[in-house]
Amino acid sequence: MNSSNQSTRISSSENSDDNIFGPRNDGRVCNGTLKKARLPCFGLDIGGSLVKLVYFEPLESTIKSSRQEQAGLEALREFIISNVEYGEEGIRDDKLEMNELVIGGRQGNLHFIRFPTCHIASFLDIAARLNASVLDRKVCATGGGAFKFEKDFREVLGVQLVKYDELDCLIHGIHYINSNFMHECYYWSNPQCIAGAQQVSYDFETDPYPYLVVNIGSGVSILAVESAEKYDRISGTSLGGGTFLGLCSLLTGCSTFEEAIELAAKGDGNKVDKLVKDIYGGDYGKFNLPGDTVASSFGKMCYADKREQAKPEDIARATLVTITNNIGSIARMCAVNAKIERVVFVGNFLRKNEISMKLLASAMDYWSQNTMKALFLRHEGYFGAVGALLELMTSAKTFQK
């Protein structure tokens, strides 16, 4: 988001007790009285690379509030709903919109918005000009940026960030969206044939436990989930989406994740990586390693003639394969050690990144001898923000102070 035609804004809300894993059309009753969340309702996940924001748009034709609040709410709603793009890099993912939900005693639609964290100063300036903070003085947030930018929110907008644990929010968000969005979960059929692999819906709601969740953002966290409220972080790696973009920026001169992915889609990583067949002349039959398996990432870059032949798109592809293979290998070992057969990959690294999804699907399928599937979720990196919104809806005491 830059300063022209920009961003969205957050404010927070207050409200009632809410069973976030209950039916989507339940009446929220607290102490015998129907409670409704204050408006507007936002959840915010401020990550190392991206800010993810969810906005709950109420469908009531009239909302009890002061004239100033009503005008502010309508202006904010109009700004968010009338745009799909905000400046150059702010995006509302309209295809992910969830309609006619009941949250906090109100019926409405849920909208999903993202923009680079490096533009958060512009985001705050736009929010201040929209006078968004008149609607509430507290904002519900998660992610490392909820701590890093707490002072900025207070000084620019005059609002307090009410912070929630990002992994709690992640798990709650996954469960809520999966139970309310049709065909949220899917896998890739025939993953060994990368070009011919197709998405197939997967029933992840009936009996999901236990499962492993691999959250790929700037870095990677791996969680073993035993129930809706019980999970452990069992591993992770610093080599994630931030590593991919950082290396691509250094090696190819690209500046955005989208540009790096587009480069990788056109490249040939085999011109950069050393393969099994480059060493053995073919397959390594004893250990069932096909000749086209990567034996050494960037291994051909030791030779001057190979460096001269490698194009920026080949380097981007090899970088993507290197990061993806590392994540897949760690996830596979964690699944085996934890004796868990279902592995769910989420996070913004997978956005517009079919290459990595198919590589992960192929690797999990191949090394498990077809006994383990890589599962994916359509809302990818928004689960933390949704979880923050749900925490907001269940934390009335916080917002009554």
Image (tube, rainbow, N blue to C red):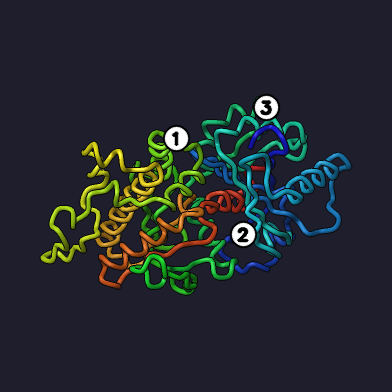
Q: In terms of depth relative to the viewer, which is nearer, 289 or 168?
A: 289
Question: Looking at the rendering, which quadrant does residue 28 occupy?
Answer: bottom right
The residue where tag 1 is placed is 253
Position of 398 relative to 119 (above/below) = below
Asked if 158 appears above or below 52 in the picture, the reply is above
* Badge 2 amino acid: Leu
Q: Kindly report which numbered mark, 2 or 3, lies closer to the viewer in this rendering.
A: 2
Q: Residue at position x 41%, y 39% from top?
A: 248
* Crowd rating for badge 2 (residues with CA inside 10 Å; few <14, some 14–19, many 20+): some
Work out which residue is located at the far right of the displayed protein and give it: 67
| Distance between the alpha carbons at the discs numbered 2 and 3 | 30 Å
Q: Quadrant of the N terminus?
A: top right
3 with respect to 229 (left or right): right
Residue at 69% from the left image edge and 30% from the top image edge = 125
The crowding category of the residue bearing disc 3, from other C-alpha atoms within 10 Å (few below 14, some 14 to 19, many at least 20), is some
Residue 156's disc is 3
Q: Could you say where residue 12 lies in the image, as x and y percent from the top left?
A: 68, 43
Residue beneath disc 2: 96
Q: Amino acid at mark 1?
A: Gly
